[in-house]
Amino acid sequence: MNQPDENLKDRDHKKLGKELDLFTFSDTVGKGLPLWTPKGSAIRRALERWVVDEEIKDGYLHVYTPDIASLNLYKKSGHYPYYKDSMYAPIVIDDEEYMLRPMTCPHHFELYLSRPHSYKELPVRFAELAKLYRYEKSGELMGLQRVRSFCLADAHIIARQDQAKAEINRVLDLIERFATTLGLKPYIDDDHKGDYYYRLSLGNREDSKKYFKDDASWDYAEKILHEVLIERKKIHVVRVDIKQDEAAFYGPKIDIQMWNVNGKEDTAFTVQYDFVMPKRFNLTYTNESGQEEQAIVIHRSSIGAIERIIAFLIEKYAGKFPVWLAPVQVKVIPIAQRHNEAAQKVLVELQKAGIRVELDDRQERMQAKVRDGSLQKIPFMAIIGDKEAALAPPSVAVRGREGENFGLLTLGAFLEKLKTDIETKR
């Protein structure tokens, strides 16, 4: 197990979130309901756009479904009796009870049922950045890591049973690609520590109040997930644990576990095998013989809850986000007031190129402005003095947040560097 980070105070996402002006909370709005500032929203937007684009490339069909639904939908899915203590109270509209949704799966199943499907179409991979609402006890709330309103990078794969293992491996491949891009490393053992490991989360067959009773289906689903993890451990070299009584009510799951700076473990991403919902919703397809056959469902989250992964990343990077995720990528600094006009032109050109940029035209010493930019963890400072303002084409002296001196660059060369860093996710 990871121990608490010795630099806890410097990395705690709640402290950095306030210092870097990324998010806030208001008791007037409600406990556990984060408010994203423009800077925090910039991180979130960059992350969400990347996730959606990469999932579409991987064969997912991105959709939109409503944040509320009839209580009957969650009774049909079976979630209500198992999860009602974690759901908000019903909203009564025209004598019908509605719920703020705590999960997306039944919405996606109704979408699947909107028309017939052939075996040739499967797997169908519905994905959504879904706003969800779950009632967490006030004592369990913690910054962005545990909130009552969050956005989940959710998906539901409706497939034939013979496609299950390949689809689960495909999901784990995507999760590992995302993790690698975000700078997260697998935890192998105590001599090769990393950021995450796999946990096979099993059910308790004796607890019929918590888990659906169907021993044969549990046996089959657990066998599939266990085989996938054993094969992946040989190839990918990652720690794999097994834990009882941590499954979903509808089947076992593979949880990707991570630690925060306090050493507390949380589930970041998940892959779940579901043998209950296909029966409850009659999720079928027409097989090669023209007969109706029942599908299976794989629930998965590629980067988990946006709030939770951003909390992890704030602590992972100690607020020093890579250029592509940095809320402000460049700070333009005129040395004196006479350089403001040239600095304004640089600001506009960078904005036109899609760069997240700020202008610091305060009447302060240049060194103070550079120091403030470094404290705000901004990757680059573009400085403009007499020399830079007089040059054609427009040029800037570039400094890094760690004190690096990149020298005098034309604005075109600086833009090329920025675009390369952004495209390569540096």
Image: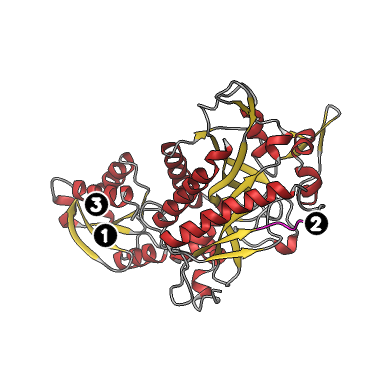
Q: What residue is shown with label 3?
A: 417
Which residue is labeled 2 in the image? Answer: 207
On the image, the x and y values in percent for residue 55 come to: 46, 40
Q: Position of residue 88 (x, y in %)?
A: 77, 46
Residue range of the region highlighted in magenta in the rendering: 202-207
Q: Label 2's element?
A: loop
What secondary structure is found at the residue carrying circle 3?
Answer: helix
Q: Eyeballing the image, is 249 above or below 125?
A: below
- Residue at the front extreme? 289
Q: Earlier in the sequence, mark 1 or mark 2?
A: 2
Three-letter residue code for mark 2? Asp
The quadrant of the image that shows the C terminus is bottom left
Decide which of 106, 231 is in the foreground and name it. Answer: 231
Q: CA distance from mark 1 to mark 2?
A: 69 Å
Q: Earlier in the sequence, mark 2 or mark 3?
A: 2
Give above or below for 12 relative to 345. below
Q: Amino acid at mark 1?
A: Ile
Magenta stretch: dominant secondary structure: loop
Residue drawn at point x = 50 percent, y = 79 percent: 6
Q: Residue at x 13, y 46 (%)?
A: 392
**Label at residue 335:** 1
Q: Which mark is first along the chain, 3 or 1?
A: 1
Across and down, in percent, residue 313 comes to 48, 60
Tell which of 112 and 101 is nearer to you: 112
Could you say where residue 90 lies in the image, as x and y percent from the top left? 81, 40
Q: Secondary structure at mark 1?
A: loop
